[in-house]
Amino acid sequence: MDMSKVFKSSLGIKYPTFRDYPLHSGEKWLEGKNNDDGAEGLWRIHDNLYDLNGFIEIHPGGRDWIELTKGTDITEAFEVHHLTDNAETLLPKFFIKKATSPRSFPFTFHEKDFYKTLKRRIIGKLETLPKHLAIKSHIMTDALFASYVGLFLLAVYFKSFVLGIGAGLCLGLVTVAAHNYFHQKDNFRRFYFDFSLMSSKEWRISHVLSHHMYTNTISDMEIAAVEPFLQYLPGEKNLLVRYGSWLYSPAIYAFLFFGFFVKTLLQNYLKSKVTAWPTLLPFTIPVLAWLLTGQPVMFCFGMFLWIVIMGSIHFGIVGLNAAHHHPDIFHDGDATRPKSEMDWGLFQLDAVMDRKDITGSHFLVLTNFGDHALHHLFPTIDHGYLEHLYPVFLETCAEFQADWRLVSQLDLIKGQFKQLAKVLPNRNVPK
């Protein structure tokens, strides 16, 4: 389906090349950005082009971030992912020339505006916080993974599908928790995400580089990936999509993990005909259960399918109802701020709501996409620190008259279904 005839950007963003490519792969999204961003095969930051080839192997965050983004505009990712001035100091060494075309995106990062002001204050606050807050996140995440494996083995040993539900819940929780880690520099915990059948490397593109930077716009892969079945942007929709999606959404939740796995296999095959080793990680657990319990191999894999479905349902319910879909949240096509007020941080607040049921609990924030506004503004910061950043955040919001919205989980669940049914754009300009 040609979604370009349905959804138009109110931000003035060109309809992304390959947005409607059936596979919705991160690789294709990046290929489209290569066509659209005016980076000329280099790395674009604001209106300058840099050659970072010599920096790939020594990048402190890992080679993925540099290698994947060659030929694209990385302005937002560069500004948001670096919490010191080290990267900015190094940049002039790699400068090649000025870009010859304007940026595709309207977002700004002026020193005296909301985001850069907040960023300076957050950096100062982080220096005063104890390191054990991140260690608590590590312990919780490791414990959830261990619980998943333990409950999986018990479910197979006792042939208990009830224990399988418990294992599936732990799988869903550890998958969300692992999302904390694929935002950060290379570390082993990011691979917990791959045990869900999804790919942490693919999500570094679709979630980190796309969704986080261009939230709820036509350049957000997480919007495009569920189309035409779930259509969150305002525009022409038939009755089945508007209201039938309320009924078939649970089926989509149940098979999210499987769908992403099939997409990863196809992407690997089309690119190199080789399966990347993280793709095999999920299958180590049913094989372990078979070796340790002596149960038939088919039963072990049947339980695996059951557990994956349970985890996928949890992940789908939490993920799609976490922060971004409600009629009062900005979706591309809605009225926008004036160009003079297109600060990236303010835009992020327009595209998110937080849940009062989740905020305040380290465990719930880590496992339910909590403290979502602060996480979007500073995605590399461990979730354990976020609750301690609120005094600085709220003070800066008040200073710039920025609207941080806190609602209930139920409000967002109801709002998500209302947004699916929404056809007319919101004409109220964000404040």
Image (cartoon, rainbow, N blue to C red):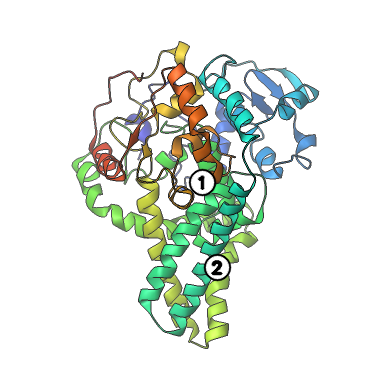
Screen quadrant of the N terminus: top left
| Kind of residue at disc 1 | Ser
Q: Residue 81: x percent and y percent?
A: 62, 34
- Total number of numbered discs in the rendering: 2
Whether residue 26 is visible to the viewer of this picture, yes or no, is no
Q: Is residue 364 left or right of residue 249?
A: right
For numbered disc 1, what is the local secondary structure? Answer: loop
Screen quadrant of the C terminus: top left
Q: Residue 72: x percent and y percent?
A: 62, 31
Q: Is residue 68 left or right of residue 15?
A: right
Sequence-wise first label, 1 or 2:
1
Residue tagged 1: 25
Q: Is residue 160 left or right of residue 197?
A: left
Residue positioned 63% across, 59% down in the render: 276
| Kind of residue at disc 2 | Ala
Looking at the image, which is closer to me, 359 or 319?
359
Q: How far is disc 1 from disc 2 in space, using C-alphas?
A: 31 Å
Residue 251: which quarter of the image?
Answer: bottom left
Q: Is residue 151 above or below residue 228?
A: below
Residue positioned 24% across, 34% down in the render: 422
Q: Residues within 10 Å of mark 2 (few under 14, many from 20)?
A: some
Q: Is residue 72 above or below residue 24?
A: above
Residue positioned 27% across, 20% down in the render: 427
Residue tagged 2: 146
Residue 277: which quarter of the image?
Answer: bottom right
Q: Residue 311: x percent and y percent?
A: 42, 62
